[in-house]
Image: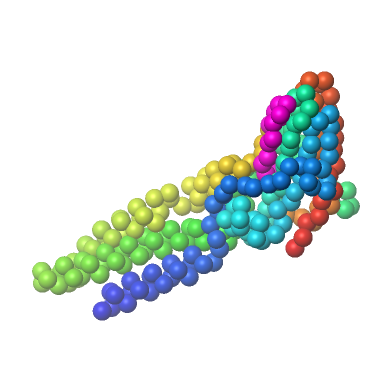
Amino acid sequence: MLNSKFVIYILSSILVLSGCAAPLKTDTVSFNSPSSYKNKQEIDGLQIAVVPIDSQEKSKEIFGTDLKAAEVLPVHLIVQNSGSKEFEINHQQIFGVMSDGKYTVAYTLNKTAEHVRKSSIGSTAVAGAVAGTLAGAAIGAGIGAGVGYAGGNVSQGAATGAIIGGATGAAVGTSEGLSDSFTVKFKQELANLAFEDKVIFPGDIQQGFVYLKWEHYNKIRMKVLNITDNKIQELMFDVSVMR
């Protein structure tokens, strides 16, 4: 009876932990053409729009969680080349601009993943993995106790079951390990939708996200290279960040 109660307690704990923060899990992105956004700008047939993902609902729709919990602001870049020239956008030359004129450089994928790992999103993922291991041990102990009871040695059966159950729980709950492996997983998820450096050829529609520190920016600064004419142009997009 005691083992059964303990198993129920552990499983209940997992449910509580899993409810603390939603996991980071990217999904397909839907978007409109750049021309439909108010801050759209155009260079020689290249149209660009910049959209901060600042609502909880939109962040959960795209990333499976609210990235504000990690103080990360995803910014959606949408680009369409209706002209005849080739362009390149360097994601390292994209900055958030504050009302006082201060610039904030976009995070690298590594740094973004680190922030997610240190936030409640990451701690909940790790806690859930640990709880999975404990649940495996508890369930194994309960099964082992039943086997031990049938064989006349309850304590030994429970101990053996706990070892087997713990190994099973580890395989299920922490097969990806802890800490560093979670950071790697978060990076992979963020990379799925990252803009990074892109060459935009004639006829292309490109989109993706850069990740900034969460601040109330009023502009996004971007540098665009016209590869065909070997010209560089700096653009400033008006934005507003809610919450």
Main secondary-structure element of the magenta-colored stretch = strand
Colouring = rainbow
Q: Residue furthest top?
A: 229
Chain part drawn in magenta: 198-211
Q: Residue at x 88, y 53 (%)?
A: 99
> Is-magenta flag for residue 159?
no
Judged from this view, the residue extending furthest toward the right is 100
User: Residue 86 sits in which quadrant?
Assistant: top right
The spot of residue 118 in percent (x, y) is 59, 56
Q: Nearer the viewer, residue 152 or 28?
A: 28
**Does residue 107 sit above or below 148 in this rendering?**
above
Q: Is residue 201 magenta?
A: yes
Residue at the outermost left position: 151
Q: Quadrant of the N terminus?
A: bottom left
Residue 211 shows up from this direction: no
Asked whether 220 or 181 is in front, the reply is 220
Name the residue nearer the viewer: 31 or 57: 31
At x 38% / y 69%, what residue is drawn? Answer: 11
Q: Tally the marks.
A: 0
Query: Which residue is drawn at the image coordinates 31% and 67% (left, top)?
Result: 138
The residue at the point 32 percent across, 77 percent down is 5
Residue 162 vertical position relative to residue 184 in the rendered view, above or below: below
Q: Is residue 91 visible?
A: yes
Q: Residue 66's spot in the image, x, y percent?
A: 63, 59
Q: Which quadrant holds the C terminus?
A: bottom right
- Residue 193 left/right relative to 220: left
Tell me where residue 34 appears, x and y as whole percent.
76, 42
**Residue 140: percent from left, percent from top:** 26, 64
